[in-house]
Amino acid sequence: MGLLSSAFLGLFAVLVAVLAPTVIHLIRVGGPFLTPNPTVLGAGQGPIVIEDTIHCEDVHHYRPADLLFTACEDLKATRFDWFPGLGHLDTKAAGRGSIHVVDPKVCDLFYNATRGAYYTVWSGGILTSSILYSQTFKSTRLTFENFESGFVTHGIDVIEDPERADAVYIFAINHLPNPEYSPSAPTSAPKARSQIELFHHILRSTTVQHVRSIRHELIQTPNDITADSPSSFYVTNDHYYRAGLLRLIEDLWPFAKWSNIIHVQLHELQAEHATSALTASVAHAGLWNNNGLGHARHPAELIISSAMGGELYLATRDENNTLSVHTTIPFDTTTDNPSYYVDPFASDVHDASGLVVAGISQAVYMPQTMHDPDAVDALQVWYAKPTRGGTGWETRLLFEDDGTRIRTGSAAVLVPVEPERVEGVKKAWLFVTGFLSENMIAVQVEL
Ligand SMILES: *[C@@H]1O[C@H](CO)[C@@H](O)[C@H](O)[C@H]1NC(C)=O
């Protein structure tokens, strides 16, 4: 063997050694060898199917009011032809979805004999009758006020209105077709012109008011949003390319770290034009396929997911609004929109607070199934907590399905169950939603 070929072999060996962990992790995330193992649920653990939640990609638990918010496509067919998030770009198919509120409470009435009155209990425990199901876990579509536009939904965020505690601001991605695109000159303009809608909602009302639209050239392929005030938010661009071979390379090649996160500052909440009274800047670049964004343990910390990378990152917000990643937590599936569960019943002995993230477990089949309204896609929902001592993170599978009870998984939130109602064991309702699922579901899990 010549000097050159042994040098080449050596280099090859080094390459294999360096790349092997990446390749092994990628194979796990892609799931070609995975056999889905659907979680077996006991009596009273669900699944409870939330009616009228078609293709709701994201869900948030707004704790002050104990309500879930989600944005849904509302029709089964449209997303398979128009959904820029999946590279589906038939502009004629763009639909009009809506914002929904889901009540996660089981409203039992308890009679207090001493006081001679009935009291409601704010959160669910052991379900004793099927009537409870029909009274709660219901989705209500909010009626738009002053918003006539098309609405193709993706990630959202919900934050309190700092000026009135009984209201929220809702940020929502809207993947609109580009009015400047012309089929006769297909290369002149991109097909999608995605923007962000800002809405205002009075809690417990059935309407939502449009505040303004937000569009900026730095926001190209928006996926998810995290807001820290009505005028300041972060948004991920999940890809650099909207279509074609280069987008495929972005999906498959871990070193194609071309996605970024944009920070947007609104100078006026009400603005006549989507592009006026705002500034935008790159808050982070260089992650592979950054996708979901969520609030973490304190206001200056965010969770970012790398969808194809199967990783969550914890990042700190700097004074100048850039994000510095300080922790990486790997998972065995793709990772979509992350949430952070705050255990309201935390004690010194047991604090169940942690990260929750859903992902598809057989991403390898997605290129075919994403065109088929009747296909199934397996998913897993993960939970991560700091290890004792606090140096690392331990991850645990919370729920798994083969795609028949829920299809795809893109967001999951935990809603606590009062401990005394489940004999001191820490339990929660896990609400899971999927970007291609015809329904959101709720299952009860132990933490
Ligand atoms: C923003 O702040 C961080 C941390 O202090 C610093 O590393 C970074 O260079 C700053 N970026 C800009 C664009 O000023």
Image: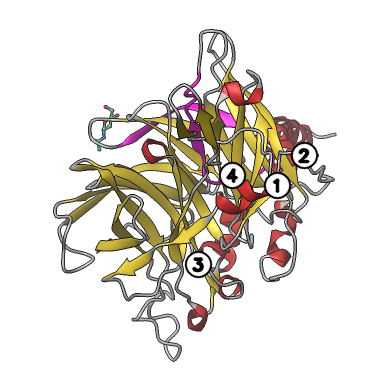
The answer to whether residue 18 is seen in the rendering is no
Q: CA distance from mark 3 to mark 1?
A: 30 Å
Contact, mark 1 vs mark 2 (Cβ under 8 Å): yes
Ligand 1 shows up in the quarter that is: top left
Q: Nearer the viewer, residue 376 or 307?
A: 376
Numbered tag placed on residue 84 in the rendering: 3
The answer to the question of whether label 1 and label 4 lie on touching residues, with beta carbons closer than 8 A, is no
| Residue 431 image label | 4
Farthest residue to the bottom: give it.
Answer: 184
- Residue 135 is situated, as x and y percent measured from the top left of the image, at 56, 51
Q: Is residue 274 magenta?
A: no
3 or 1: tag closer to the N-terminus = 1
How crowded pointer 1 is (Cα within 10 Å; few <14, some 14-19, many 20+) is rated as some
Image depth: mark 4 or mark 3 in front: 4
Establish whether ligand 1 lies closer than 8 Å to the Cβ of label 2.
Answer: no
Distance in Å between CA atoms under marks 4 and 3: 25 Å
**Segment tinted magenta in the rendering:** 322-345
The mark lying in front, picked from 1 and 4, is 1
Residue at point 44% right, 76% down? 191
